[in-house]
Image (cartoon, rainbow, N blue to C red):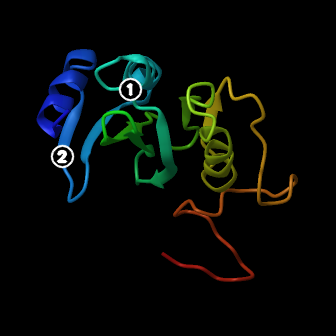
Amino acid sequence: MTNEELQTFISNLDSTAEFEEGPQYLNATIEASGLRKLAEELKNNDQTSFDYLFCLTGVDWPEFMTVVYHLKSTQHNHAVVIKAKTKDRENPNVDTVSDLWQTAEFHEREAYDFYGIIFNNHPDLRRIFLEDDREGWPMRKDFEDPINIIDY
């Protein structure tokens, strides 16, 4: 599919999606509540067959958090970036996609560990890099580290 065809396909599934043509990929921003339905369709539909999630990360914005998913179809050789925007920055949550793409299991744990993003129905959501008793989310812009003194 071309980026134009992907945009039409996604728009038909989520009419609130906003699009931006990036230098490499089509970027679609959606509300986090619509992620699960869109992800299932992108993976399972024969026209799209996005069988490979090659990157997942969190992004901290002043009023919300975003989870960014880079997807590729090895069958059709097309790619797309889906940005799931949360409504609540303080307690961000998104449905897991780890049952659709196994690589998401560890990516979601990393986003939880550093940003505090909760992935609903994740099979093992716990810290992956930091100590279990660590307080705070070090990649958030409001995180204060009195020892290393990181200012944004």
**Label 1, label 2: how far apart the Cα atoms are:** 21 Å
Element type at mark 1: loop
Q: Which mark is residue 20?
A: 2
Q: Position of residue 75 (x, y in %)?
A: 37, 33
Residue 113 lies, with reference to residue 91, above or below; the image says: below
Residue 129 lies, with reference to residue 74, above or below; the image says: below
Residue at point 21% right, 35% down? 18
Q: Position of residue 36 (x, y in %)?
A: 47, 21
Report the side of 101 relative to 60 (left or right).
right
Residue 34 lies, with reference to residue 4, above or below; the image says: above
Q: Amino acid at mark 2?
A: Glu
Which residue is at the front of the view, 121 or 65?
121
Q: Amino acid at mark 1?
A: Ser
Which residue is at the front of the view, 75 or 79?
75
10 Å crowding of disc 2: few (<14), some (14-19), many (20+)? few
Which residue is at the front of the view, 54 or 137?
54
Q: Name the N-terminal-most of marks 1 and 2.
A: 2
Q: Which mark is residue 49?
A: 1
Residue at point 24% right, 56% down? 24
Classify residue 73 by image quadrant: top left
Report the side of 141 relative to 23 (left or right).
right
Q: Position of residue 16 (x, y in %)?
A: 23, 24
Q: Position of residue 117 (x, y in %)?
A: 60, 42
Classify residue 90 by image quadrant: top right
Residue at point 78% right, 49% down? 127
| Comparing labels 1 and 2, the label whose residue is closer to the camera | 1
10 Å crowding of disc 1: few (<14), some (14-19), many (20+)? many
Q: Which mark is residue 69?
A: none
Element type at mark 2: strand
Residue at point 61% right, 49% down? 111
